[in-house]
Amino acid sequence: MLNNNWTDDRKVLAEIEQRNEKAIAEAEKALEIEEKILGDIGPLAEEGGVARLQVERQRQTIAERRQQLTELRSNGTIERDRQNQPSSRSSQRN
């Protein structure tokens, strides 16, 4: 019975890690796109083709994406660490 709990815990941990990796990959891709957009509109703003406000909004979007990515990484680590801790049920059985 204890072995089944360990196996179940490992499956849950693998699912959590897979979900976190996917979310982080998606956030990294979104950040990459936002940075490319900024790279494209930056020179246009210098030439007056794009409003400075649009550039600043793009910078803000990038900052928000970076914050989301940081939170995803942090939350994934916390969740993984929680799953790696021995559960009180298995401690009681020993």
Image (tube, helix red, strand yellow):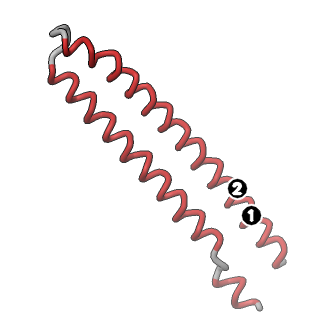
Is 88 placed left or right of 56 in the picture? right
Quadrant of the drawing holding the N terminus: bottom right
**Image quarter of residue 2:** bottom right
Q: In the image, residue 78 lies at what x, y percent?
A: 52, 65
Q: Residue at x 47, y 58 (%)?
A: 74
What kind of element bears circle 2?
A: helix
Q: In the image, residue 12 lies at what x, y percent?
A: 68, 60
Q: Nearer the viewer, residue 76 or 37?
A: 37
Residue underneath mark 1: 10
Q: Residue at x 42, y 33 (%)?
A: 31
Q: Nearer the viewer, residue 8 or 36?
A: 36
Residue underneath mark 2: 14
What kind of element bears circle 1?
A: helix
**Image quarter of residue 63:** top left
Q: Are marks 2 and 1 in contact (CB under 8 Å)?
A: yes
How many residues crowd around disc 2 within 10 Å: few (fewer than 14), some, or many (20 or more)?
A: some
How many residues crowd around disc 1 within 10 Å: few (fewer than 14), some, or many (20 or more)?
A: some
Q: Residue at x 50, y 31 (%)?
A: 29
- Give above or below for 45 relative to 9: above
Name the kind of residue labelled 2 in the image: Ala
Q: In the image, residue 10 lies at what x, y percent?
A: 74, 63
